[in-house]
Amino acid sequence: MQGKFIVFEGLDGTGKTTQLQCVAQALREKGYTVHTTAEPTGNATGKLLRAFLGGKERSTPWAAASLFLADRINHNTDPDDGIMKHLSDGDIVLCDRYYYSTFAYQGTDTDLNWIFDSHFNCPEVQKPDACVFLTMPIEKCLARIHAGRDASAVEIFENTDSLTRIAKRFADVFTLLKDRETVFEIDADGSIEEITQRILSAIRPILEA
């Protein structure tokens, strides 16, 4: 039986990584086999991308978009721990960021149609069964970011102007994808437990299909 692939997205500071782990634990308690993963990955392309996002390496939006695609193909096809391998084993795969982030972040400064085509025409990029998109006011996102990290750990997109622009781009992307992707927008303002229950309620039909 093929597993299910669910992506967690949202602006930095919305708590998506915390919620992914909470949802994974809740599903395991219900008897599901769950594999959690994230992008950029820990392989060579992923490490280069993290250096770029941290401002330690210089790149262009076009080069970054291409690197994300290469990293994503490796993430899908790794024979030992890739997304496709876990799905074929029947696992629930929960991924922290996926191509929606590339569309919103790199798509802002390149050609979005080019990025769409490079992903949707690639047979080694798995389409998610659903995307959980956490929403929260930008001021609260930034407050969380700065409360949880020192200044040297803040990434290049983590400022008011960039997050405002990216939030609009996410909205544009999801409008363009409304007929081909399943996206659940979840209010991430509330207690951790409340938000986890909102997500579990949203994805239940996907898991039971």
Image: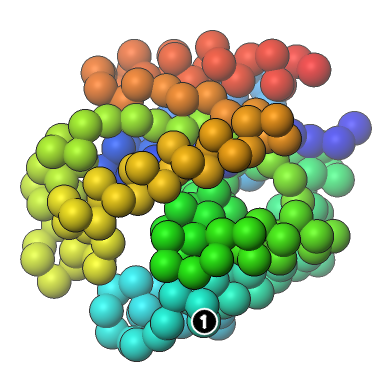
Which is nearer the eye, 45 or 127?
127
Query: In which quadrant will I find the C terminus?
Result: top right
Task: Indicate the quadrant where residue 177 lies.
Answer: top right
Q: Could you tell me how many numbered marks the image carries?
A: 1
Give the residue drawn at x 49%, y 61%.
107
- Circle 1 packing at 10 Å, graded few (<14), some (14-19), many (20+), is few
Which is nearer the eye, 21 or 53?
53
Q: Position of residue 80 (x, y in %)?
A: 76, 64
| Residue placed under numbered mark 1 in the picture | 63
Residue 2 shows in the view: yes
Disc 1 element: helix
Give the residue drawn at x 25%, y 22%.
189
Above/below status of 57 relative to 102:
below
Give the residue drawn at x 56%, y 77%.
67
Residue 26 shows in the view: no
Which is nearer the eye, 131 or 74?
131
Left or right, 71 with reference to 139: right
Left or right, 77 with reference to 202: right
Left or right, 119 with reference to 7: right
